[in-house]
């Protein structure tokens, strides 16, 4: 029987705006690992940036995590989801844990591992200016309070609490993603643990919370590599065992720059993908493969990801976001859905287009199969279904100009006559009757099918000619063919 501790991983976003898809990938890898190992996935809100943190942003995080299906074992509770949230290591907001940070800071001071620093911002600024004037870059503040007796200061006066960083030796770890990393201790400075307002800075808050919550593996972006050695030093100062660490490379845009709303044309907020008509499982599938490989397999169900994920195949180089690949993954997941699920999920997107269609509508059910083969997202699926539920057709300008021309008006009228007189209104009968007209006349089908497609749908892409007719129904098909013939007659000759 293994003596290894239970896997406990966490995702700790700052609620200062939207949940970035790069952060979602970090959360996903942690969630997959916890699920696979029967461990715990903790959601912790790091809201110490009080100027930027808002309740609305917290809700955005919770909504995004719920939409993605990344449920947490411990963390903030959610109204309407009684099994989500809570736990024995709360509260799960850093601003509600100030007493704990003070307790740990007092312990470090008592043990001679930290000290109260009463240096003012002005003193630190002047020290920096003097150093840079003589040496250039590389300033590390040397506090005059490091080696003073604690009794010389007044704890009621404004002060910060600084860590007594060791000046010799090396601090290192074996990173889950990047391998062995060693950092000389003489590169560290006496970094601040707590500000005068009682809130911790990032490194101290992380260590206190991760230690108190029993976190066994910390996974985050590789911009945090610089924070890991100071955190390990803090664990050592507290006499605690540090967790393992893994640092994920950034997700970059096609231009090689960090994904952000300012410099990319793709969506970077998790909930944007919900609004764009993506499926949660498709988003997770794509993000999982954006940095992790499993042979040639590209499409994974959620259960497959849980079963197959491993740290050994997480790459150490940055990955580039590829919208074309993302849409391919999304389209495959869309086609995996059964008819009931598809119909229910597309209804809100039809409603957004002004169409009130019930999920059990017979035409909707019949059209889903062929239309989904030409759609990637639910927005595209709704667009492909749109013309089935309109009284009138809106023609795409290019399609109208190319195919609704005077010389093709007669073909549309003849086709309407054939549809009207067909003995049965099914694909086989319609195709037989149309060929009985076009073949003896040596009329190429492109001069019939494409104008008819535009007449019935307003566009050049749709399910097959006869399939579209049957889905529209006889009366609507005839009416649209004859209306388009009149439009064609009034067009300017080619």
Image (cartoon, rainbow, N blue to C red):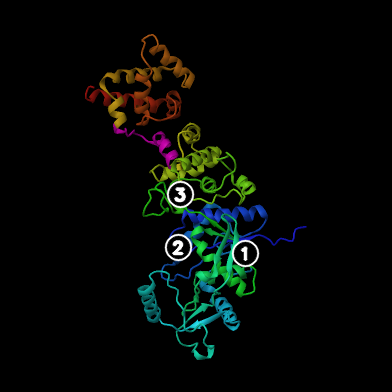
Which label's residue is closer to the chain start, 2 or 3? 2
Crowding at mark 2 (Cα within 10 Å: few <14, some 14-19, many 20+): some
Which label's residue is closer to the chain start, 3 or 1? 1
Which residue in the structure is indicated by mark 3?
Answer: 273
In the rendered view, would you say 399 is above or below 41? Answer: above
Residue 243, labelled with which disc? 1
Residue 134, horizontal then vertical, whole percent:
37, 74
Dominant secondary structure (helix, strand or loop) of the stretch shown in magenta: helix
Residue 71, horizontal then vertical, whole percent:
58, 56
Apparent side of residue 395 relative to residue 242 in the rendered image (left or right): left
Residue 206 seen from this side: no
Which image quarter is the C terminus in?
A: top left
Residue 448 seen from this side: yes
Q: Residue at x 45, y 47 (%)?
A: 321
Residue 324, horizontal then vertical, whole percent:
44, 40
Residue 382 is covered by the magenta coloring:
yes
Alpha-carbon distance for marks 2 and 3?
17 Å
Nearest the viewer among 26 and 364 is 26
Label 3 close to label 1 by CB (< 8 Å): no
Residue 57, labelled with which disc? 2
Q: Residue most toward the bottom?
A: 151
Alpha-carbon distance for marks 3 and 1?
33 Å
Q: Which residues are magenta?
A: 379-397
């Amino acid at each position: 029987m293994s003596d290894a501790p239970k896997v406990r991983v966490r995702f700790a976003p700052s609620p200062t705006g939207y949940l970035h898809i790069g952060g979602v990938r970090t959360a996903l890898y942690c969630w997959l690992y916890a699920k696979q190992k029967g461990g715990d996935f903790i959601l912790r809100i790091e809201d110490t940036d009080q100027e930027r943190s808002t309740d609305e942003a917290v809700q955005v995080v919770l909504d995004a995590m719920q939409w993605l299906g990344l449920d947490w074992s411990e963390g903030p509770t959610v109204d309407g989801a009684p099994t989500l949230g809570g736990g024995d290591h709360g509260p799960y907001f850093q601003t509600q844990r100030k007493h704990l940070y003070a307790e740990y800071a007092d312990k470090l001071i008592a043990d001679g591992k930290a000290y109260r620093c009463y240096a003012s911002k002005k003193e630190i600024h002047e020290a920096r200016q003097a150093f840079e004037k003589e040496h250039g870059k590389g300033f590390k503040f040397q506090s005059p309070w490091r080696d003073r007796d604690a009794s010389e200061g007044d704890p009621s006066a404004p002060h910060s609490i600084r860590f007594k960083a060791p000046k010799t030796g090396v601090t290192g770890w074996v990173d889950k993603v990047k391998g062995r990393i060693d950092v000389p201790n003489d590169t560290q400075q006496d970094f601040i643990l707590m500000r005068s307002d009682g809130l911790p800075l990032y490194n101290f808050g992380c260590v206190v919370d991760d230690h108190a919550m029993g976190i066994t593996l910390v996974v985050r972006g590789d911009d945090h590599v610089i924070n890991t050695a100071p955190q390990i030093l803090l664990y050592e100062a507290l006499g605690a065992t540090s967790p393992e660490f893994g640092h994920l490379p950034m997700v970059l845009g096609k231009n090689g720059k960090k994904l952000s709303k300012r410099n990319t044309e793709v969506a970077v907020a998790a909930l944007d993908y919900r609004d764009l008509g993506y499926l949660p499982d498709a988003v997770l599938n794509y993000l999982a493969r954006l940095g992790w490989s499993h042979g040639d397999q590209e499409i994974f169900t959620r259960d497959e990801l849980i079963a197959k994920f491993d740290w050994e195949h997480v790459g150490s180089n940055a990955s580039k976001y590829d919208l074309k690949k993302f849409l391919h993954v999304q389209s495959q997941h869309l086609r995996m859905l059964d008819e009931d699920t598809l119909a229910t999920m597309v209804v809100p997107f039809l409603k957004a287009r002004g169409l009130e269609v019930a999920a059990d509508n017979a035409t909707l059910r019949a059209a889903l199969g062929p239309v989904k083969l030409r759609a990637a997202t639910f927005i595209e699926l709704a667009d492909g279904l749109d013309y089935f539920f309109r009284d009138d057709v809106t023609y795409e300008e290019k399609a109208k100009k190319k195919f609704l021309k005077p010389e093709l008006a007669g073909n549309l009228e003849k086709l309407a006559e054939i549809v009207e007189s067909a003995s049965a209104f099914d694909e086989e009968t319609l195709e037989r009757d149309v060929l009985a007209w076009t073949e003896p006349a040596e009329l190429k089908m492109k001069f019939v099918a494409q104008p008819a497609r535009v007449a019935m749908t307003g566009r050049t892409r749709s399910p097959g000619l006869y399939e579209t007719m049957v889905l529209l129904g006889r009366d609507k098909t005839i009416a649209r063919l004859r209306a388009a013939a009149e439009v064609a007659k009034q067009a300017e000759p080619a």
